[in-house]
Each structure stands twice: as C-alpha cells, then as structure tokens.
Image (cartoon, rainbow, N blue to C red):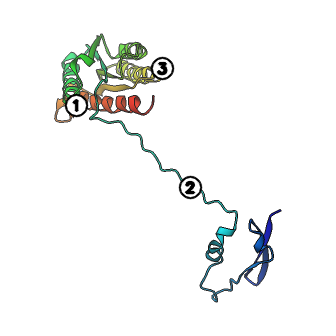
Amino acid sequence: MASWVSRTTLAASAKTHLLVPCRHHHLEDATLRVNFLERRSPVSPLSLLASHSRHLPIEIGRTAAVRHLVGSVTNTQGLRFALVVSRFNEIVTRQLLEGALTTLKNYSVQEEDIDVVWVPGSFEIGLVATQLGKSARYNAIICIGAVIRGDTTHYDAVANSAASGVLSAGLNSGVPCIFGVLTCEDMDQALNRAGGKSGNKGSEAALIAIEMASLFEHHLK
C-alpha cells in the first residue's frame, strides 16, 4: 500500500490539502508543508515540490524530435522521368520541353532515364499521364502544354480539363504528375514564359519533378 505525503497550500487565505502518493515508506508520517503567502515567499510551491520529486511517482514526458522530410535535387541517381508534351501550340511547347530536358540533364538525370511522349493537345495530357504513372516505370511525370485564350469559351474548357486531368493522374497513379501547362491570354505571354523574360516554366516544372520524385522514392515509399 502506498504511503501518503500531506501537502498544505495556503493561497488567498484558503487552505487546500493535497495527498500525493509516495513510494518510500519511511516518509509515511512526513509532512511537506508549503507556505505560499502573497508577497512573502520568494520560492514557488512548484519549485519546492520539484525538489522532492525523487520521492514522488511523477513521470516526466519526453518530446520526440520533429522529422522534416524533404526531397533532394542533388541525388537523382536511378530516378526515371516521363514528359507528356502537347503538339498544339508546338512553337511554345517545344521550348518548354527543351527547358525541362536541359534542367534534368543539369541535375545529372541520365538521358536513358528520360522518355518523351507527344499527344495532340493539352486535353489529352491527363489520360496519358495516368497510364504512364500506372506503369510503375517512372518516378515523376512532367506534363507540358500551352493553352492560349481565343474568342470562344473553348479556352476555359481545355484549361480546366488539363489542370484537373493532371491532378487526377497523380492521385490515381500515386506518381507525382507536375503541371507544366501554360494558360495564357495571348501568344506573346506564352513565349515570355517559355524561355523569354519570364523564364522557362518547363525548366521550373522539371525541378519540381526532381524534388517530388526524390521525396517519394526516399521518404514516402
């Protein structure tokens, strides 16, 4: 039977008795008296209680270190990539493709680990990306296209379908599918994003693909 230590706390002119189980029988009749009078005691009851904690069955919890999982862009050995590229607006998509291929090679991805698949337009990208993902041959798939606004609502339908198709491809296959489809107001804007003053979005998509492929391969399997 555990012995008990009676602790008396005087606070705000009220007395509170707290019984704390004690494992040491030689403290059976001991009394831990804590005087906590307002502005009179420089020592808090908690600090006094802590000094006797070796006699009390109090367990101090431990907080495990937080792990941060991040994909690497430097360890690309063995990673395989597929690029699904729309032929529609090829003057734009070919430059996006070149930007993506250059980035993959700059980050030490081997040419034999890269496959390029051409499709008629951005609408068809999602379906092909899904099949490539399900093949289990690739660590990431880069989807490249260019949808440019015209005089009809066709632009909205294709742009929305391309975005949802790429998203669904990744969710359904479990393989990262990176959205590298430009949705622009005019051709000048598209060319600026395909190697012009706004950079090359194909290159950016390739860098994202490397990081995601590494994250899945090394941390999320």
Residue 147: % across, % down: 30, 21
Dot 1 or dot 2: first in sequence order is 2
Of all residues, the one furthest to the right in this rendering is 1
Residue 108: % across, % down: 21, 28
Of all residues, the one furthest to the top in this rendering is 120
The disc at residue 172 is: 3
Three-letter amino acid code at disc 1? Tyr
Residue 208: % across, % down: 31, 32
176 relative position to 201: left or right: right
Marks 2/3 in contact by CB < 8 Å: the verdict is no
Question: Mark 2: few, some, or many residues within 10 Å (few <14, many ≥20)?
Answer: few
Of all residues, the one furthest to the front in this rendering is 26
Dot 3 or dot 1: first in sequence order is 1
213 relative position to 106: left or right: right
Residue shown at the point (76%, 84%) measured from the top left: 13
Residue shown at the point (74%, 65%) measured from the top left: 23
> What's the distance in space between the residues labelled 3 and 1, CA to CA?
28 Å
> Which of the 4 quarters of the picture holds residue 46?
bottom right
> What's the distance in space between the residues labelled 1 and 2, CA to CA?
41 Å
The mark lying in front, picked from 1 and 2, is: 2
Which residue is at the front of the view, 181 or 16?
16
In this figure, which residue is indicated by the disc labeled 2? 62
The mark lying in front, picked from 2 and 3, is: 2
In this figure, which residue is indicated by the disc labeled 1? 107
The mark lying in front, picked from 3 and 1, is: 1
Residue shown at the point (42%, 34%) measured from the top left: 219
Q: Secondary structure at mark 1?
A: loop
Three-letter amino acid code at disc 2? Arg
Three-letter amino acid code at disc 3? Asn
Of all residues, the one furthest to the left in this rendering is 196
**On screen, 122 above or below 180?**
above
